[in-house]
Image (tube, grey):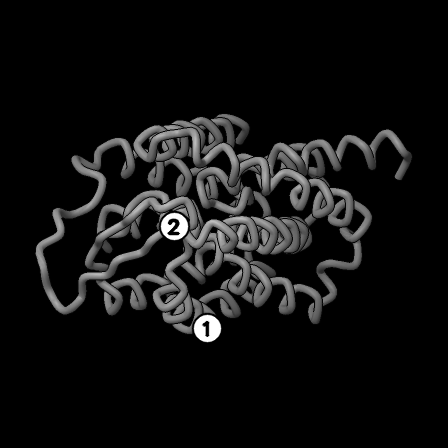
Amino acid sequence: MGLLHVIGYGLLGVAVGALGTLIGAGGGFLLIPILLFLHPGDSAAVLTGISLLVVCANATAGSIAYGRMRRIDVRAGLVFILAGLPGALAGAWATRHIERRVFGPLLGAVLILGGAAIFLSPRAGRVVSPSSRTRTLVEKDGTVHVYAPRIVLGAALSTGVGFLSSLLGIGGGILHVPAMVYLLGFPVHVATATSHFVLAFLALAGVLVHATQGDLAPGYARALPLSAGVVAGAPIGAWLSNRIQGRWILRGLALALASVGLRLLIAR
């Protein structure tokens, strides 16, 4: 691979890292469709392996940035990680058994449904009433979040999110963030930060499965500059998140999902 290709992948990684961290999605939902278009000869397993490696790098860098802001609900995140790991491992293994001609439309449909669900959701979170489940999270800058998360439901959802995210190489944030906001009662900014924390571990589980199956070997030359780029772009996304209201983050996520999903379906 030539120098221009390395630079191109690096710049793509910066964009994916910034956008993925901004909305807590890890960037895989942007990267995997691009890889499908650029590399029509590669199998779904190879491309999802590359994407999950990049998502892992992005989520790790983003988690460090959000951790410095004290925006991550670590207790909830650890529960979701433990619940999501079996699904993430199974999803990465199952990718090998999906033909590419099926993979593209499946990914497109999931992205469109995710975008539609966000657009049609009537509210961004539940009204908090005092209870034993109420939590208070204070960020480094003094911003206070009071919420009552549904941890048990979140754990159940995390297993399915882990499976689909590894199966499609999208990382899971596009599914996890809306679920955390609309179903589990998390504030948007806490959801994006905590989702990134969870993604780092679930994506790593998927990467390990792909590595042991040999899926990553053909993709390291692309994955390394992409990963370097997302590490550079993640702090930019975290910085932007302080300057964009939560509802605009969700609207941007919904629009991006629907656009990318439609493009995948049209391409078939």
Return the residue at label 2. Answer: 139
Return the residue at label 1. Answer: 86
Q: Give the amino acid type for the residue marked by disc 1 in the picture.
A: Pro
Front residue of 63 and 17: 63
The N terminus - image quarter: top right
Front residue of 107 and 74: 74
Q: Give the amino acid type for the residue marked by disc 2 in the picture.
A: Glu
Compare marks 1 and 2 and give the one earlier in the sequence.
Answer: 1
Residue 58 percent location from the top left of the image: 60, 49
Q: Residue at x 36, y 50 (%)?
A: 191
Q: Residue at x 38, y 35 (%)?
A: 112
Examine the rendered structure and indicate whether residue 154 appears above or below residue 226: below
Q: Residue at x 18, y 66 (%)?
A: 133
Q: Is residue 257 left or right of residue 2?
A: left
Residue 145 percent location from the top left of the image: 27, 49
Q: Is residue 263 left or right of residue 130?
A: right
Badge number at residue 59: none
